[in-house]
Image (tube, rainbow, N blue to C red):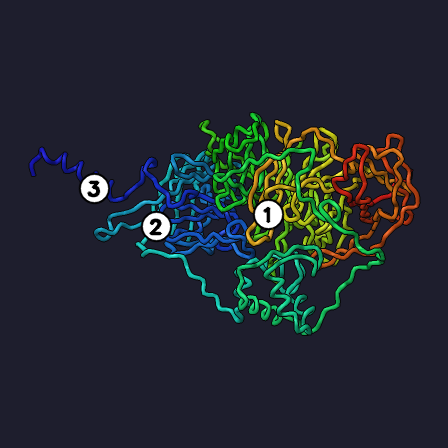
Amino acid sequence: MNPRLRPLLGLLLVGLSLMATIRYRPDRIERPREVWAFRSVLDLRPRMLTLALDSACYVAYDLQHCRLYKVWKGGVALEGTVYNSKKEIQPSSWGAAYFTDSLQTYQWTAERNGQNVFSKIIHKGYFFKNNQIYLQYALVLSSGDTLYVEERPEFVQDKKGRPGLARPGLERLFKTSQVPAGVQVSLKTPGVTIALLSNQSTRHVTYYAPLPAQYPPVARKVYAHQGQYLMENSDCLTCHELDQQAVGPSFQQVALRYANDKKAPRYLAGKIRAGGTGAWGNGLMNPHPQFSDAELSTLVDYIFTLKPKEKKAEKKEENTLKRPPRPVKPGYGAALTSVHPSFTLSTLHRPDFLPKVGSMAFRPDGRLLVATWDPDGSLYLLSGLESGDSSQIRVKRIATGLAEPLGMEVVDGQIYVLQKQELTHLIDHDGDEVIDEYRSVCSSWGVSNDFHEFAFGLVYQEGYFYATLSMAMRLLPHQKQLPDRGRTLKIDPRTGTFESVNYGLRTPNGLGLGPDGALFITDNQGQWLPANKLIHVKPGEYHGMGWALLDSLQKPTMALPALWLPENEIGNSPSEIVLIPDGPYRGQLLHGDVTHGGIKRDFLEKINGEYQGAVFRFSQGFEAGVNRLRWGPDGALYVGQVGMTGGGWSWNEKLYGLQKIKYNGQSTFEMLAVRARPRGFEIEFTEPLPAGFQVPTADVTVQQWWYLPTEKYGGPKMDLEELAIKKWTLSEDRRKLYLEIPGLKKERVVYLRLPDDLTSTLGHRLWSSETWYTLNHIPEN
């Protein structure tokens, strides 16, 4: 060979060697999905991170164990409440696997001089750089030392295989730091050991045999009855269960009630199509115009096949009421339909920004952060809110891939988001306001793959975060609630640890600070919870949800709520709580409701050192069910709204909304407060009653009852009775009306409805004539 050609030949061989493995330049990487890194349950496994690296390569990591779970060609079927409004299902991978570690054979190890010194490994989060992701782990040694591992996965291709057919591969670039001298960190599985170089980088590449094109599977479930197919592919199972009453009656209850009624099939078919209320209480059933006559007949026939052999005796409400019910209209026995007159409504969403609001918080500069409860799990930064003109608002998406972010706080300018299975610190490192790092603060509470294991709220107080965890709802017979479920957590962001504050909660979607900095939560009615609640959080208290008990024979006494929120009357799915900072309602609380809709106002007082009080209808007229509330720097109340298709958790089947209401100075005539007295109640009004006013006591409704918790959804009103007013007095300024009511009992809910034609001295009609007072204690003086 010509000696002058040897250097050129050497360069050519080096070039061919480098070309054999196709590695992607970061500035040329294209991902198959816009949101290519996202958190979720996957394949019935919690705390999973899925990475769509390439159309030929999806990767999933089990963050709970800091392990690679699966590498495959295909995709993810995004199903579940947040994705397609279906319960009892979660996202799952589809396609063919290059690799799967379903048995968790890969194990992290740390050895010093041949001796195992590994203690545990902890997921610390991940960050993005040049459109690539870097996972971060902390590996704790038995000596107490902590070292750190960083892993950057990427899709690569190898052309050394058959001509024209590149082998797909996964490149894992590891980087270790703070590794003590003499310690060897490895990732081991039977037959394979990845030994990581200490305090430097290690590259490991695995190539796989090429796979053919993959396609999403077509569901081919076999149904014994076509009615079951129709039911499972509609919203029926959102509110009904087979044998247990839920939001609506069980199908067995329906079959039992109408078993001997020959006209029932036609009646029930019409009821399903038209929807409505009244047959089983005040709960509203959505209409179903999409069903044909034949399909309705099939559905009804299937319901009758579910009839049990023997009718079960049901506990009846004890009702001694004799007076016929009064007529109803909005604010007078029925929900409001419009915005509170003292507030002006502005709509902030628009056609190109329709958020299903999971959480909200304001930055110190006054800009609003909005996290969405949707498949993308996005975080948006909104500016230009002052005018209330949606066309002037600037919307910037700064984070994606969050798993059901239902809580958020900004602390010292830093953003913290509560995902379904983790408290996360979101950090922008380069100043472009787009989140670069998703740092794990706490992810050690117990989780399963159940769709209903939400994490709610987020309140920061005196150096700690507070959050609430809901119960699982679709456990199999052999499964039990995890110990951390149904609790309020106190999280230390410095250590990533938490402690339980209380327990026995079901779906505590509301969390906020009230008078004197006290922490309050709202909880949803259900099994063992006969009505919705507003609860003052106190250490060690049990709140009634029996599923939380590891030993069902040792059921403690249920703590009384500060407020009962009767189902369908004033609540169905109460949500976030805020304290009113100023104005005529200063010092009172507001809370939203996702299913009952609107905002309710809560007046609280302390009797015998315990909070109790009254709840009032406050405002409706919003786009959708109210999920989150935040006061803005402009003095307005920002109202974040959410919903599910099919009406499961929604108001009027509306799905999204971001609006605000601002006090306009207009006076509204309503009950400002209701205070317990030794023999009755004092009602304070926002405007004086007319001179010479006389109380038409026959037109005032007073009822009281107590609730019996049962294993059924909701619970009966016990000893329901109507009380009479013995006498009344009016204060000198005619703003306070005292009603003496014999027969009041402690630990009762007292319902008051004033005369419908009551007016103030200004000629204003009552905005709402009703209130529900929770009379846990009767004052002695």
Query: In the drawing, what numbered circle is on residue 56?
Result: 2
Considering only order in the chain, which callout, 1 or 2, is on the residue closer to the N terminus?
2
Whether residue 663 sits left or right of residue 761 in the image: it is left
Name the residue beneath numbered marker 3.
Answer: 16
Whether residue 105 sits left or right of residue 348 in the image: it is left
The quarter of the picture where residue 667 lies is top right
- Mark 2–mark 3 Cα distance, whole angstroms, equals 24 Å
The quarter of the picture where residue 658 lies is top right
The quarter of the picture where residue 415 lies is top right
Helix, strand or loop at label 3? It is helix
Residue occupying image coordinates x 54% and y 55%: 86
Label 3 Cα crowd, 10 Å radius (few <14 / some 14-19 / many 20+): few
* View extreme (left): residue: 2
Q: In the rendered structure, which amino acid carries the disc numbered 2?
A: Ala
Residue occupying image coordinates x 46% and y 43%: 111
* Residue 608 in view: no
Name the residue beneath numbered marker 1.
Answer: 454
